[in-house]
Amino acid sequence: MSAVHHWEWRTFGSDFGEAEHRIREYPFELLKSFDTHIVCERSDVITKIVDQRLEILALHDVDRHGLEQWSPVLTATFPLTPASVARAFGEWGIEPPPLSGTAWAPDAFLALVERQPGLTAVDVMQERRCFVINGCHVELTDLLIDATPQRSIAVEDADGEHAWRTVWALGLARYHNVNSVKALKRYAPLHAHRA
């Protein structure tokens, strides 16, 4: 998912049949990544640590087709300032613990997260095949979510109607739109508290 204002349709599964065959006919760029996502039981914001950055995106709107419009609300480079840490907790709807020190490296930040009830850090490995189809960004992704294999297809564009026409043309409209937060809550073992 790009960290810009965009409309997204996404689904998860193991086999997308003819729709996947259609997508694979197009040229693609292969990208591999290892990210850490932070899942909050009480919030549906997307939070991830990628390339020494903390990124949080919030759901801004849902259109008549069910496409979701996501917007970045926080992008901060590690080491994080206490203000950035407090902002992340605010986006999760959780009162932050007392924050000592002036800078938070990824390991220290994740240790803080893991001590909070309702927060879980989830390791996600991704192998993304990135296409441009009808002018939209389309991804066919193989994932390991805490070592559990999954597959995802996503269609993104700044124009929601254009994204929906691409979803329809590829034969994906019969699948449920499931964003990454819902998928992580479904497939990753969340904990209530880890000391």
Image (cartoon, rainbow, N blue to C red):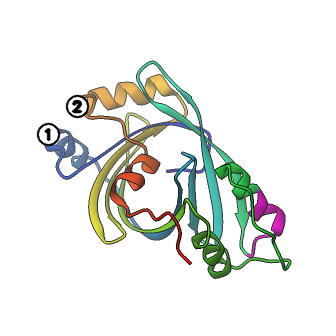
Give x and y (percent) for residue 23: 25, 44
Kind of residue indicated by mark 2? Gly
Q: Nearer the viewer, residue 116 or 29?
A: 116
Residue placed furthest toward the top: 64
Question: Would you call the spot at circle 1 few (<14 residues within 10 Å), some (14-19), or many (20 or more)?
Answer: few
Q: Inspect the image, locate mark 1, and give the three-letter code of the amino acid beneath it.
A: Glu
> Which residue: 49% across, 27% down?
160
Residue holding disc 1? 18
- Would residue 193 appear left or right of 187 to someone viewing this image? right
Disc 1 from disc 2: Cα separation: 8 Å
Q: Is-magenta flag for residue 81?
A: yes
Relative to residue 61, is residue 123 depicted above or below? Answer: below
Q: Main secondary structure of the magenta part?
A: helix
Q: Tell me where residue 60 sits by quadrant.
A: top right
Q: Which residues are magenta?
A: 79-86
Res 119 → quadrant: bottom right
Q: Which mark is residue 171?
A: 2
Instruction: Answer whether labels 1 and 2 touch (C-beta < 8 Å).
Output: yes
The residue nearer to you, when weighing 161 against 108, is 108
Up/down of 185 relative to 122, above or below:
above
Task: State left or right for residue 43 relative to residue 105.
Answer: left
Element at badge 2?
Answer: loop
Nearest to N terminus: mark 1 or mark 2: 1
- Where residue 134 appears, as percent x and y from the top left, is 38, 33
Q: Splitting the image into 4 quarters, where does residue 49 fall? A: bottom right
| Residue 49: in magenta span | no
User: Residue 76: x and y, percent?
Assistant: 73, 63
Q: Is residue 2 left or right of residue 155?
A: right
